[in-house]
Image: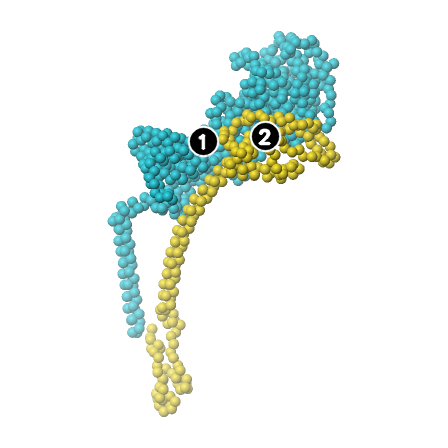
Chain colours: A yellow, B cyan
Amino acid sequence: MSDNLARVLRPNWESAPRHDTPDQKPLDAPAGQPGSRLRHIEIVATRSQRRARPKIAFALSAVAGVAVIIVAQLLLSVGISQGAYEVSRLQASQTELSRTADSVTEDLVRVSSPQSLAANAEAIGMISNSNPVYLRLSDSAVLGAPSSATGSQAGAASLVPNALLTGVPLVTQPAQATGQGASVAGAATSPATTTAPTTSTAAVPAPGAGLPTPTTR
Amino acid sequence: MGVSARSTRSGKRRIAITVVLLFAIVALFVVRLVDIQVVRADTLSADSLGNRSVEQPIYGSRGDIVDANGVVLAGTVMRYNITLSPRNAVEFTRTTAAGDQTVTVAQAAAEVGAITGQTGDAILAIISSSLAANPASDYAMVTKAVDVSVFRAVDALEIPWIYFEKKPGRVYPDGAVAGNLVGFVSSEGEAQAGLEIGQDSCLASTDGTETYEKGADGVRLPQSTVTEKAAVDGGDVVTTIDSDLQWFVQQALAKQAQATGAAWGTVVVQEVKTGKLVAVADYPSVDPNNVNGTTNPDDRGSRAFTASFEPGSTFKALTAASVLDAGKATVNTQVVAPYRYLPGNGANINDSSGHADLHLTLTGVLIESSNTGMSKFGELLTDKQRYDYMTKFGLGTATEAGFPAEDSGILHPYDEWDPQTKYATMFGQGLTTTALQIASIYQTIANKGVRLPVQLVAGCRQADGTMTNVPAAAGTQVVSASAAHDTSDMLEMVYQKAWLSKVWNIPGYRVASKTGTAQMPDGHGGYTHGYLVSVSGFAPADDPEYVVSVSLADPVKLNSSAAPAPIFQEVMSQVLKKYRAVPSGAPAPALPGTW
């Protein structure tokens, strides 16, 4: 492509205002143009020429983009590795905690076994009454034949063995209760207060004294 | 034209620079490759030792066995084996807050022993004996299956040559409660008895493996976990048992069995309207946590399922219901019951104690439990008819409960009955049943003649909560509702008027029950001097909900059905109380027993 258009041609500053050299016309200037306009004319690049021209900004932005990507990648790797240590630490902690949870669940299930409950209930003087009597609220009828509890199971040693309870103290015996046992006892008495609101649960009676009898009106 | 030429020149220059750069980079890579693969290969592979991928098992958890309310009867817990490396067992330096201190092997062994309950010398002996067997020994077991607290205590000692292995263990929180049914597993985790083996296909888990890469410091590299095979947890077996009631029943049974010196005993509690077993007690019973504590292998299972016996007089309820259903008699049909009855076919029937001829109705025959009287009713049916009734009541085949090694009982085909057996089968001799089958007979009578499949397992609960293997619950009409009702009325008369009426009295409820006293076979075709005494019945009789069947084998101190009667009374009372059965209003209809 010819590059003559790219050359900026100086206008004839001397002659143009005076028009004393009419034969000396600016090159390529249309003949009919007034001289005052010619002074500000510049030849600019065509669009295709502008496109073809390399731009430093593109190179800079590309390099900057690569740099940003590399830095981001580095930071991400650092973050992930840091996260790996964090994950590892948390997993170890989770393992420990789930071991603890399993262990205390095992203890809880063990003291919830019927043998443990019965032994503890009997230790505070509870007697099971095998003779059921019901009060029907609709007509206040007493269903069944009331009789006092004979304690069919009371006093009987547990005849249904449970090797898991060997050496486990009764939670209802304060003298033997350890810190753990006391907390289990506290948990065991709370449902009793909620499910049997008519029963006096103000204080745990002394062993042997028996439970206070609710007064039915 | 000049500019164009310059542009072409710079283009060529760029291409040249690019090519040179490319070659330079490739050359750099090649140098690096050679450096890594050849020059520094040994060093790098040594470093990579700590970078190897680690494969480890993921343990699937064996399913739980739970009772009807979700109480765990058998569960899986993580246990730890403590092992050591004998060849590495040397003294080491322990860093504590007080400073570094040297711990000798003997000290370390004593510390471990104090936690595991062994002596330090015993652990030293483990080290020396395995070194004696193999000087390069790298593995010896110190103790097996310790729990978390022991594991943590030993781990805290930071002994470098002590290692741990995870080992899933089986625990039975309720001990011997339902131990007869649940069964147990071996120390290796193999199912050995009871539901553990019977439902093993539901309970069994599959272990998986995962592989991951770890760095030199042991930290798992991110994104490197590859689960090659996922572990599959086993399903939970949901039984129909109520663990609280089961405990009560076992306790009551054990107390009376010990008081009467019985060899063994069983109690079955079944729901009339569903066929579900809510308690099946055995005495003696195994504690699955301590199987070796039960010395006799026969005591480690459930005789209620696996032992069949001649039921004796409790069986008369079946004969009476059959006769009523066939329309051959009513509750008031009269017979004369002699002490000894010699029917024409050569059989020789007598009652348990001598008496003058009794003028009894069918009701009276049951009250007096007269063999001769029942024979005169039973012979109103053909042998085939009675045999068909017996099979429809579930005799001769194991129940639907699906307990492993369940006994089917012995019921010979009617055409093989000899003259004595023809009559003996009317009052519960000459055939054998399990305690379950007797309970099922009473369930049928209580449930308007509809026999329901005996259920011990409600199903297998998968991890997603769905229940599979749910047993069929469709019943079969064995006798008509009116025949069942009449039989129930007669059994109520037995409850009221039989010689044990004071012993098994449950105030406020109408109860139908029957005793049985059967000679026990000695296993050689004859009979021993011992008796199998039993009581079966249901309550409340006006709207039956629960069947209780009690059997005691050879109670030497009280060889009559007075031995099981208190158990029946106690268990039935507890069942009625526990399930809030409404006490009966109207009294039982009075039926005449004599004429």
The residue at which mark 1 appears reads as B189
Instruction: Indicate the position of residue B2 as horizontal and vertical percent values.
Output: 29, 74
Q: Amino acid at mark 1?
A: Gly
Q: Amino acid at mark 2?
A: Glu
Instruction: Indicate the position of residue B56 as horizontal and vertical percent values.
Output: 40, 40
Chain identity of mark 1:
B
Q: Nearer the viewer, residue A213 or B370?
A: A213
Q: Is residue A154 visible?
A: yes
Q: What quarter of the picture does the N terminus of chain B occupy?
A: bottom left
Q: Secondary structure at mark 1?
A: loop
Q: Secondary structure at mark 2?
A: helix
Q: Is residue A32 visible?
A: no
Q: Nearer the viewer, mark 2 or mark 1?
A: 2
Q: From the viewer's perspective, is residue B461 above or below residue A88?
A: above
Chain identity of mark 2:
A
Residue drawn 41% across and 45% down?
B225
Q: How many marks?
A: 2
Q: Nearer the viewer, residue A149 or B411?
A: A149
Numbered tag placed on residue A85 in the rendering: none
The residue at which mark 2 appears reads as A122
Crowding around mark 1 (Cα neighbors within 10 Å: few <14, some 14 to 19, many 20+) is few
Using the rendered view, name the quadrant where residue B248 is placed.
Answer: top right
Tell me how far mark 2 sits from mark 1, CA to CA. 36 Å
Crowding around mark 2 (Cα neighbors within 10 Å: few <14, some 14 to 19, many 20+) is many
